[in-house]
Amino acid sequence: MYDGRKIIPGLILFFGLVTYPVWHNLASGKLNYVPKPKLPADKKECVEPKEVIRINHKTLLEDWRNSVVRKAGKTYVAYNNKKYPMSLNRTCMSCHKDKTEFCDQCHNYAGVTNKCWDCHIYPKQLEEKQS
Amino acid sequence: MDFDRRGFLKVAGLTLLGLSVKPGWQVFSKEEPAEPSPGAETLARKRWGMGIYFRKCWKEEGCRDCIDACHRIHNVPDMGTLKEEIKWIWKAPYEKVFPEHEFEVTEEDYQQKPVMLLCNQCDNPPCIKYCPTRATWRREDGIVMMDFHRCIGCRYCMAGCPYGSRSFNWRDPRPFIKKVNLDFPTRTRGVVEKCNFCVERLAQGLIPACVEACKEKALVFGDLKDPKSEIREALKFRTLYQRMPELGTKPKIYYIL
Amino acid sequence: MVLTPRPLGIEHMLDKQTKIIGEDRVLFEHIWKTGKNFYITISILIALVLLGLYAYITQYLTGLTVTGLSRQIFWGVYITNFVFFIGISHAGTFISAVLRVLKAEWRRPISRLSELTTVFILMFGVGSVLIDLGRPDRMLYALRYANFQSPLLWDVCSIATYLTVSSISLYLALIPDIAMLRDLGGRGEWFYRILSLGWRGTEEEHHRLDKAIGFVSVLVIPVMITVHTVVSFVFAMTIQPLWHSGIFGPYFVVGAIFSGVASVIVVMAVLRKVYHLESYIKPIHFNNIGIFLMAMTLLWFYFTFAEYITVVYGNEPVHMAIFWSKISGKFAPLFWLHFTLCFVIPLPILAVRRFRTIRGTVIASISIVLGMWLERFVIIVPTLTRQRMPVQGAYYIPTWVEWSILAGCISLFMLLYALFTKVFPIVPVWEVREGREKAAATVAGRITSYMPETGAPKEQSHQVS
């Protein structure tokens, strides 16, 4: 191979760098890490079934946001026909009190950033601020 | 069939022309194209308005009850400088608010007296047409709404408002809020904000915070479409002022002599 | 990209290259030769761009509070930059498209450098608005949730159209020159081969290209007028005093052509000097554009005068408060400085033949460019100090962030421009050659066709017997 002495080590270096996340996680044992969000102790029911809300909570919250802010529709009828206010704080956070123990567990793992908390204040945050 | 470059260009041109019909129509239509609003009809039955009694407001000098109440429950920050100040309701001297009133011979005792200023919630708002993203719009019940999620911070609405009712977050406001109210979000830097007629309180059947906080009951609020409401009673048979009515904005804040 | 023709030792290649370059070697030399001065200039420009970038990052991290803007005066240097840069972009269209439509042969050597000014500076016009946004991460919302009642959206549409059409115009006129560079061979040949789109230089291809360029040139002229009219509508459509004026549409277009043509003169002079293009860009070019610039100076004065005299005659208190702040108040120094730079200095230089040399025209042009930036500033900021609500103590002093970003934008423009001249010839070689070979005959034929018919009256084609 022309210039083989430069190309082959270069290729090895390149693939090594590119696959770094995989073998680093293997080596440090993090490959089997599964995020464990802390579920609320008392409440067993969410506005949607677990599988549905796990996938759709982003779209659900965006729909709620557009509805409350722009369209004046404020009540959400859940899959079990129960009525909930369309509110991040009053509905979601009333059960999942601390975002660092629930929301962030999966979001940090998946590398998801959301800007909800730039404006909205979760209950635990207020307690900390006032104490 | 032979479809050459010219033919393609013709079809593409016609398609583009067709696609531009809807936005073109939108430019010339007065109303916002309908985003189906479940409560639209209910909302349209009301028209919120506010009256401010001068003399009741002037009873206590230096009173700031309405300002403090509004800024407290809405997490309005105290930025500390005139440059960055954010205010939803504030005071200005009478002769600055109504410069068209003559002062040399009449109304001498009104000079320097404070007048409460806030967003006029106009029926014909000059600010909403400029927003490139429709982050501000007029709701069916008359309230000029702000969607902080959509605002891109271009400040064109601030240029549109002739009353100077809108403020901009020049930096992150959170460090400047004395006591955070959990029930209402703060805003981020880079968005415009203004008085929202306490929409969140109206949704719960409460009156705006400033109206409730005023000890002298100088602020009166209600549904202008309801002939028996408090605001309609207050506006009957009285001398009323409005800020710059000649602009055709149809403000909904009435100043009652 | 440095293209060095490598003869590869074959005689007929050398011969072919000589045939392509012909007598216009100097038009290609700035691509092949890079002197010390170029590297020094590039280094300075890169340093300024990095300064601008640092300033913007500071602003992005902290918020717009790092500028001098306030609740009262919320639009300042960035919006001035926006209007100013979009204004300068009218240069290319005027010199390239309008002169082409008017069949002015002297536009040949300068059409590409002015078109390039347009295309590159438009990006900074748009960039200035994006820099001004409070939430730039949401900038695409203007497209996703577009509200077509907003003049800003009209701006988006018209500037996008203008950028597209100008880029197409620039590219079309580049094709024959790219083909020439492709035929010269060398290391960068693959790049030019792709871009040349298989241009062979046949009669039919030239004919089609002329038609295409002609079409685009005619198309871009109404777009140019629309663009700055729509930019003026951002202000004119509000009800703010001294903004809400019907004259803003044509006023801004005239101001744009004015500042644009002046900036093209500066660009022409610089390129002529550093790339030794003296035999192509001649005093006659500066003289002709200088005369046009003089007409624009007078036209600009007319619009400014008409705008202010109507305000004075109306004597409405709200308008007069702002008027006096410009004439004798807070903004008087800036107002009279801009008037001097836009009118008092350029007019005598451009009007008197003896002063309308290359140096004179360039001095007048620099004065105009600076004056027009101030003119935009003086239109935007004083209205915001008063609006309709008298407020004490409203002042606006731009901070280092705003000046750095302005410097960064201008430097990046110059940097991109300089890099362009390292890849493509800045004087359109094929247009100059077309002028040299065919123009004299075409023009002579055209002039003959204007002349009245002479000699015996022709026989009637139908005879009444």
Image (cartoon, rainbow, N blue to C red):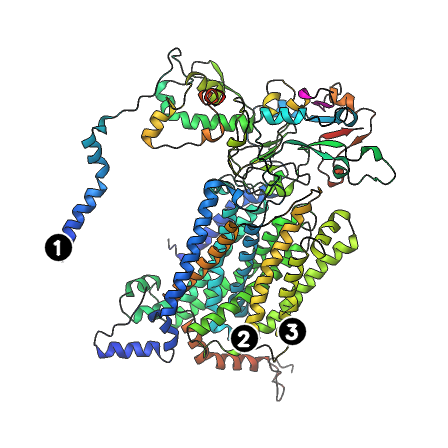
Mark 3 Cα-neighbour bin, 10 Å: few <14, some 14–19, many ≥20 = some
Mark 1 Cα-neighbour bin, 10 Å: few <14, some 14–19, many ≥20 = few
Q: CA distance from mark 3 to mark 1?
A: 71 Å
Name the kind of residue labelled 3 in the image.
Answer: Pro
Can you tell which mark lies on residue C348? 3
Q: What residue did someone put label 1 on?
A: A4
Tell me: residue C94, above or below residue A24. below
User: Looking at the image, do the residues carrying marks 3 and 2 touch, with CB atoms under 8 Å apart?
Assistant: no
Mark 1, chain letter? Answer: A
Q: Is residue B213 left or right of residue C424?
A: right
Q: Position of residue C273 (x, y in %)?
A: 45, 74
Q: In the image, what residue occupies the spot 15% across and 54% down?
A: A6
The residue mark sitting in front, 2 or 1, is 2
Name the kind of residue labelled 2 in the image.
Answer: Arg
Query: Residue B193 appears in which quarter of the rendering?
Result: top right
Q: CA distance from mark 2 to mark 1?
A: 59 Å
Tell me: residue C149, above or below residue C425. above
Q: CA distance from mark 3 to mark 2?
A: 14 Å
Q: Position of residue C103 (x, y in %)?
A: 53, 73
Q: What residue did someone put label 2 on?
A: C359
Q: Residue furthest bottom?
A: C455
The residue mark sitting in front, 3 or 1, is 3
Can you tell which mark lies on residue A16? none
